[in-house]
Amino acid sequence: MKIKEQDISDFQLNDEFINQSKINYYRVFSLMTFHVFLIEIDKEETLEKIWKKLNSKIAFYMQDKFESNFEKWNLYLFFIINEDCSVPIKYEIENNPFSSRKIVIENNNKKDSHEDIISTHIFDLDIELNIKEQIKLDEFKQGSKIFNLIKEPEIELSRDGRSKDESITVIYEKLLKIYSDEV
């Protein structure tokens, strides 16, 4: 992975609160190219005021110029704040689907390097797999009880007027009955 800082001096922010923040822009070269903005902010109040504006400006002025669809869909905004961020604000920012993936990093008092932040949050996979039971593929072949149940006419998920949740509940209840009768 190669990380190269990009010049954004021609990027017109024109906002008093945005200009109080330190913004760095990086192109990350791996198998594909990723674009990363790291926005360092002192206070949650400033974060709350600028994140939507900054997200929109980056989408409008920068994202449209990216070369491939992959690059356009792999844009990351890291909001680095030196204090705690309230759960509702962090949730709103990180779950906003417009334009980019947004990550709020709180209490960055240890001052992680930009490269460490990018590496940790984009490329490090810390996934613990807890496999309890291996399912054999032939358990779900055509003609099995589960397959036949799902094919029943009253189980059609979107055609019978029920919501998907209701249909799934019906499937679950029928499966419980089928397998409890076997025991």
Image (cartoon, rainbow, N blue to C red):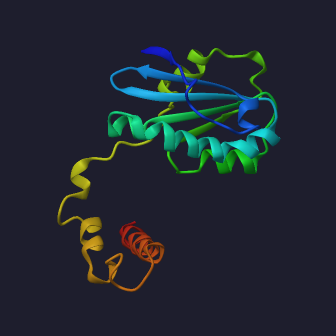
Count every numbered label the image shows and give the total: 0
Q: Position of residue 112 (x, y in %)?
A: 67, 16
Residue at (43% x, 82% y) in the render: 162
Residue at (51% x, 43% y) in the render: 59
Residue at (55% x, 25% y) in the render: 8
Q: Is residue 181 above or below residue 69?
A: below
Q: Is residue 79 above or below residue 171?
A: above
Q: Quadrant of residue 42?
A: top right
**Image quarter hosting the C terminus:** bottom left
Residue at (50% x, 24% y) in the render: 124
Q: Position of residue 178 (x, y in %)?
A: 36, 72
Q: Which residue is outermost to the left?
A: 142
Foreground: 89 or 165?
Answer: 89
**Image quarter hosting the N terminus:** top left
Apparent side of residue 22 relative to residue 158 in the rendered image (left or right): right
Foreground: 65 or 174?
Answer: 65
Q: Quadrant of residue 31?
A: top left
Foreground: 100 or 13?
Answer: 13
Q: Is residue 173 above or below residue 73?
A: below
- Asked whether residue 100 appears in the rendered view, the answer is no
- Asked whether residue 62 appears in the rendered view, the answer is yes
Q: Position of residue 181 (x, y in %)?
A: 39, 72
Q: Which residue is outermost to the bottom?
A: 161
Q: Position of residue 153 (x, y in %)?
A: 27, 82
